[in-house]
């Protein structure tokens, strides 16, 4: 129970806090503003979504929840792309990008932590694991934030480039869900790298959260990820030189 | 004079056209002629714990969660994960898979909820089907 909870927290929370750390590193002066807006927007939406799980799950012949998640991933990527291509900072866009991802990852956490009745002994392990998993995820995010801030002295575009990777990750995740729903072709895996970097390892979780790494990506995922990354990098380059 | 920043057009139209063109290769939106298999989850145990499917074909797996608690069906090797609420069912499309063994687990109870999916080559699959028909 304890280890499982730590792993689940790590897997679900890390992508959200890493995205938040990249957005804050891209605009450190607006940290308090963005965090407040994430809280104001995210908490009520997450609560609203949690109250409608059963309804969402029954839509589209039992695939309503997945369709909603695919929309959230796509919206997250869209908001990140919009941020990257604007000259001025839009704090609501940054907050919206984090909230869109929070609605996906946060829902799994809500299900596991709050909507799953347990015995008292298991509850203690659960909350201890949640604290450990949250602590690890937040520590990694804080380290990433400071690392990006330091790297910006040498390479100004580092935060923007990592955000391009993050947007590509969200699109890849949306395609993954559409494969699972059989709404998109190209679901056959291109390769399997379980022997190199296992996706279920700690490094695999981190690379997945930051870059969208998959040890067995499908054709569709690989194409969507590459295309999104290349287009955003090209557009960002054009934007920064204009 | 308005001081409100205006949002520029997000992405060129050609980007969306290219993405749609490249992603929409033939895929049935509602696949009614796929092999269908069923998994049942009860008392945090998958039944059957070993599921045999034909390799090289897309298959539809219906997972019935007969426990009151939600469970997350997950398989890294099949690149699939889906949360199934308590006392409900969920559908996962898998494949086409290479011949081999693909483990899966219930993420919320990985110690007990686990199983494996075996993708059989065509000849073995046909033999299995024939053996089943003979038994009938």
Image: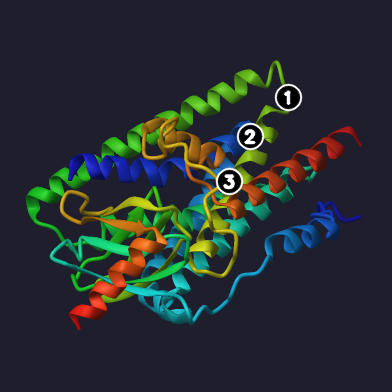
Q: Could you tell me which secondary element the residue under label 1 belongs to?
A: loop
Coordinates of residue A196 in the picture (x, y in percent): 45, 30
Host chain of mark 1: A
Disc 3 packing (10 Å; few <14; some 14–19; many ≥20):
many
Q: Chain of mark 3?
A: A
Q: Position of residue A88 (x, y in %)?
A: 78, 43
Label 2: chain?
A
SS for callout 2 = helix
Nearer the observer, B46 or A54? B46
* Residue drawn where x is 70% and y is 48% of the image: A228
Query: Dot 2: few (<14), some (14–19), or many (≥20) neighbours within 10 Å?
Result: many
Of mark 3 and mark 1, the one earlier in the sequence is 1
Q: Is residue A51 left or right of residue A218?
A: left
- Tag of residue A25: none
Measure the C-alpha gap from mark 3 to mark 1.
22 Å
Q: Quadrant of residue A114?
A: bottom left
Disc on res. A156: 1
Q: To which residue does mark 3 refer? A: A169
Q: CA distance from mark 3 to mark 2?
A: 10 Å
Q: Residues within 10 Å of mark 1 (few under 14, many from 20)?
A: some
């Amino acid at each position: 129970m304890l280890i499982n909870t730590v792993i689940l927290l790590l897997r679900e929370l890390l992508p959200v806090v890493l995205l938040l750390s990249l957005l804050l590193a891209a605009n450190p002066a607006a940290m308090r503003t963005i965090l407040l807006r994430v809280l104001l927007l995210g908490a009520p939406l997450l609560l609203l979504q949690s109250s409608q799980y059963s309804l969402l799950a029954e839509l589209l012949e039992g695939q309503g929840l997945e369709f909603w998640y695919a929309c959230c991933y796509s919206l997250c990527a869209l908001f990140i792309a919009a941020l990257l291509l604007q000259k001025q900072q839009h704090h609501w866009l940054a907050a919206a990008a984090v909230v869109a991802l929070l609605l996906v990852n946060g829902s799994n956490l809500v299900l596991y932590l709050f909507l799953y009745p347990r015995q008292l002994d298991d509850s203690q392990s659960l909350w201890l694991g949640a604290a450990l998993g949250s602590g690890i995820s937040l520590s990694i995010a804080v380290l990433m934030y400071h690392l990006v801030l330091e790297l910006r002295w040498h390479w100004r575009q580092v935060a923007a480039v990592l955000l391009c990777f993050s947007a590509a990750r969200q699109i890849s995740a949306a395609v993954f869900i559409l494969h699972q729903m059989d709404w998109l072709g190209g679901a056959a895996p291109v390769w399997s790298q379980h022997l190199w970097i296992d996706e279920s390892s700690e490094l695999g979780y981190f690379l997945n959260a930051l870059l969208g790494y998959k040890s067995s990506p499908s054709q569709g995922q690989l194409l969507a990820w590459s295309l999104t990354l290349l287009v955003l990098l090209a557009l960002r380059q054009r934007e920064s030189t204009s | 004079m308005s001081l409100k920043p205006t949002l520029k057009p997000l992405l060129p139209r050609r980007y969306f056209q290219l993405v749609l063109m490249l992603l929409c290769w033939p895929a049935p939106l509602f696949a009614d002629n796929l092999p269908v298999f069923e998994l049942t989850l009860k008392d945090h145990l998958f039944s059957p714990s070993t599921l045999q499917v034909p390799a090289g074909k897309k298959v539809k797996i219906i997972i019935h969660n007969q426990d009151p608690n939600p469970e997350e069906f997950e398989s890294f090797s099949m690149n699939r994960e889906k949360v199934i609420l308590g006392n409900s069912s969920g559908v996962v499309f898998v494949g086409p898979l290479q011949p081999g063994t693909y483990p899966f687990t219930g993420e919320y109870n990985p110690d007990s909820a686990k199983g494996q999916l075996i993708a059989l080559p065509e000849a073995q699959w046909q033999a299995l089907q024939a053996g089943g028909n003979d038994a009938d």
